Image (cartoon, grey):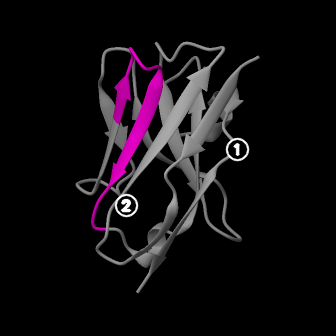
Amino acid sequence: QVQLVESGGGSVEAGGSLRLTCAASGYTLNGCAAWFRQAPGKEREGVATINNSGSTSYADSVKGRFTISKDSAKNTLYLQMNNLKPEDTAIYYCAAETLVCTLQRWWFRKWGQGTQVTVSS
């Protein structure tokens, strides 16, 4: 059974940092993987992707603040979030298995359950 399990969310003040982790089981994260987020009342949006060669892409809103990485030995995906802003408040999801490495959510077939990130001003 394929599982993607996120952890590391929490509540921080603006300017703070969090590191999200997505542990995969029953599935090898050797292709493209991504982080998405969904704020209340908004659509789920792409945050960052990393492909099988380690190339990354980011949404403009997080460039320079967030870093996506992957540990193949641990089969784990990470998202380091620095200089957090209140507008980063959302549920963050990891996603995998896609034909196209993109920030568009409909390509991804496997999803975690999400972890809440709340940033206060």
Work out whether 88 lies above or below 104.
below
Check residue 103 in the rendering and tell me which mark sits there, or answer none. none
- Mark 1 and mark 2 residues within 8 Å of each other at the beta carbon: no
Look at the numbered disc 2 and give the secondary structure of its residue.
loop
Cα gap from disc 1 to disc 2, whole angstroms? 23 Å
Give 110 or 63, whichever is nearer the viewer.
110
| Residue positioned 50% across, 18% down in the render | 29
Q: Quadrant of residue 73?
A: top left
> Considering the image in quadrants, where does the C terminus appear?
bottom left
User: Quick check: is 79 in the magenta stretch?
Assistant: yes
Q: Is residue 102 visible?
A: no
Q: Which residue is mark 1?
A: 113
Work out whether 119 lies above or below 100.
below
What is the chief secondary structure element of the magenta stretch? strand
| Residue positioned 66% across, 14% down in the render | 26
Look at the numbered disc 1 and give the secondary structure of its residue.
loop
> Considering the image in quadrants, where does the N terminus appear?
top right
Q: Amino acid at mark 1?
A: Gln
The image position of residue 11, as x and y in percent, is: 49, 71
Work out whether 76 lies above or below 15.
above
- The tag earlier along the polypeptide, 1 or 2, is 2
Q: Which residue is mark 2?
A: 61
Q: Which residues are magenta?
A: 69-83
The image position of residue 97, as x and y in percent, is: 61, 20
Local crowd size for mark 2, using a 10 Å CA cut-off: few (<14), some (14–19), many (≥20): few
Q: How many marks?
A: 2
Q: Nearer the viewer, mark 1 or mark 2?
A: 1
The image position of residue 34, as x and y in percent, is: 49, 35
| Residue positioned 28% across, 53% down in the render | 63
| Residue positioned 63% across, 53% down in the render | 44
